[in-house]
Image: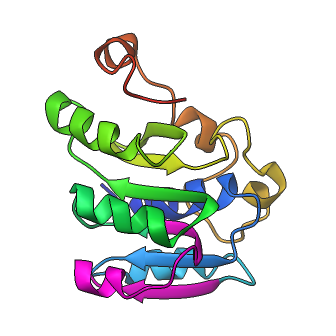
Amino acid sequence: MRDFIYAEMMVHVPMCTSKEAKDVLIISDKAELLMAEVARHKGTNLKVVGCSLNEISSLGDAAYDVIISEMGDDAAFFSQINRILKKDGQFVTTHPSLDNVEANKNIMKTLGKYFKIIMPYRITNGATALLASKEYHPTADINLQRADMIDGLSYYNCDIHPAAFAMGNYIRKEYLGIIKN
């Protein structure tokens, strides 16, 4: 997978779904590419922490509009994400392949305790990310003007955004009642 596609899709999908993403948190041990993409959104306050539950636990309540994570998937982690995310926040995380149905169902069920919307989306070449939203729907509430006005992108655009959420029937059937859209 091309690194720029991964970084653009991990950042711009939640940033363009959020009504007004000002405070952004990246949870990663290698955040340089993600940081560069967040910097394309003027007026954002960016914080980066490593993949450590202790670091995340020390962050303030309801402090972030968007959280982009490359960290694990356990219940304690998701509880902390819920605590530090604002009431209308977006959370994007890496996750196992959609072919690993049981692992993903467990992740999605846990996230379902905190989020109204939970949807996988394609990054490229079969790789997917998982968007969880407390308020905004990633295809119904996309900010088209924001998506079209980002300078210097190589992949992401306002057409790619909703198309990334299109899934085949076998995935829809396998995850029926688990994906919340």
> In which quadrant of the rendered view does residue 52 lie?
bottom left
Rendered view: 61 above or below 81: below
Rendered view: 77 above or below 52: above
The stretch drawn in magenta includes residue 165? no
Q: Residue at x 71, y 71 (%)?
A: 151
Q: Is residue 177 visible?
A: yes
Specify the quadrant that holds the N terminus: bottom left
> In which quadrant of the rendered view does residue 104 lie?
top left
Residue 86 percent across, percent down from the top left:
61, 66
Q: Residue at x 35, y 44 (%)?
A: 128
Q: As rendered, which of 20 and 88 lies closer to the eye?
A: 88
Residue 69 percent across, percent down from the top left:
37, 66
The stretch drawn in magenta includes residue 52? yes
Specify the quadrant that holds the C terminus: top right
- In this rendering, position of residue 104 left or right of residue 45: left
Q: Residue at x 62, y 36 (%)?
A: 162
Q: As rendered, which of 124 and 60 lies closer to the eye?
A: 60
- Give the total number of marks visible in the rendering: 0
Residue 138 percent across, percent down from the top left:
62, 42
Q: Is residue 3 visible?
A: no
Q: Which residues are magenta?
A: 45-67
Residue 33 percent across, percent down from the top left:
42, 77
- Colour option used: rainbow
Which residue extends farthest right? 145
Rendered view: 69 above or below 103: below
- In this rendering, position of residue 122 left or right of residue 174: right
Q: Residue at x 26, y 67 (%)?
A: 71
